[in-house]
């Protein structure tokens, strides 16, 4: 299965992907993690850091090669869970082209929606627990605005394709997971 998770920072995409990995046996691709894992002292790492450290999206020309290289690996041949990708309509189009060339398609888009005040609280807590430098009040505000202006249109793009499943991410992680399983089962 090819599943896209869409939701603002702090909606629980990573948490839910981690749970689904075990159940579905497909990898979890977090572009945020892949970008943060680039060596900060390398030329690429410095460019990536200049974007993510202030809450901006890394440009498509940096993201797409990283994603397509990862998708070419053996463990992705039967699908994956996309977490934080695509973040722009252009990336969604490029992903669609990549999958179509391989006679594959997105099976489901899970939209995790959460109240803004809950998101800020979650992200500040995550900053402490995971030592995430990009989870501070200023960067959180910037990231939520970037989500609203650049990533939310991706949701409309996928709604036009009829494969968006709405999930209330304002619940316990267990309840969210149960709702995801029910939604995915309804797609079969």
Image (cartoon, rainbow, N blue to C red):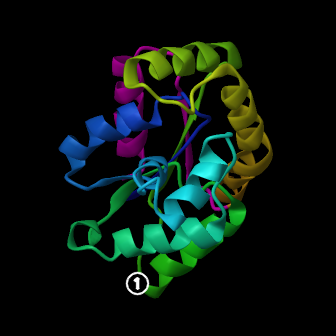
Q: Residue at x 55, y 16 (%)?
A: 124
Within 10 Å of disc 1 (Cα), the crowding (few <14, some 14-19, many 20+) is few
Q: Is residue 182 visible?
A: no
Instruction: Give the camera-side residue of 69 and 168.
Output: 69
Q: Is residue 173 magenta?
A: yes
**Stretch in magenta:** 161-188
Q: Residue furthest front?
A: 41
Q: Secondary structure at mark 1?
A: loop
- Report the quarter where the N terminus lies: bottom left
Provide the residue designation for mark 1.
102
Q: Residue 122 lies in magenta, yes or no?
A: no
The answer to which image quadrant residue 176 occupies is top left
Q: Would residue 40 be seen by someone viewing this image from the given angle?
A: yes
Is 99 rendered above or below residue 27? below
Asked whether 155 or 36 is in front, the reply is: 36
Measuring from the top left, give residue 40's x and y in whole percent. Answer: 47, 53
What residue sits 52% from the left and 24% below the top? 169
Which residue, as the protein is rendered here, is positioned at the far bottom? 101
Eyeballing the image, is 33 above or below 64?
above
**Left or right of 153 on screen, residue 171:** left
- Compared to residue 180, the image places residue 58 above or below, namely below
**Residue 175 position within the rendered picture, expressed as x and y whole percent measured from the top left:** 38, 19
User: x%, y% of residue 178?
Assistant: 35, 26
């Amino acid at each position: 299965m090819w599943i896209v998770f869409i939701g603002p920072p702090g909606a629980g995409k990573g948490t839910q992907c981690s749970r689904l990995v075990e159940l579905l046996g497909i990898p979890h691709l977090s572009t945020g993690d892949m970008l943060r894992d680039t060596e900060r002292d390398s030329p690429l790492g410095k460019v990536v850091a200049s974007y993510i450290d202030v809450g901006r999206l890394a440009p498509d020309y940096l993201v797409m090669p990283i994603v397509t290289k990862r998708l070419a690996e053996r463990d992705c041949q039967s699908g994956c869970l996309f977490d934080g990708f695509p973040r722009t309509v252009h990336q969604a189009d490029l992903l669609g082209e990549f999958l179509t060339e391989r006679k594959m398609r997105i099976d489901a888009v899970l939209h995790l929606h959460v109240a803004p005040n809950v998101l800020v609280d979650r992200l500040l807590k995550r900053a402490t627990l995971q030592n995430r430098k990009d989870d501070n009040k200023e960067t959180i505000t910037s990231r939520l605005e970037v989500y609203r202006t650049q990533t939310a249109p991706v949701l409309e793009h996928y709604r036009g394709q009829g494969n968006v499943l709405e999930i209330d991410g304002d619940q316990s992680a267990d309840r969210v997971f149960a709702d995801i399983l029910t939604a995915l089962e309804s797609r079969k």
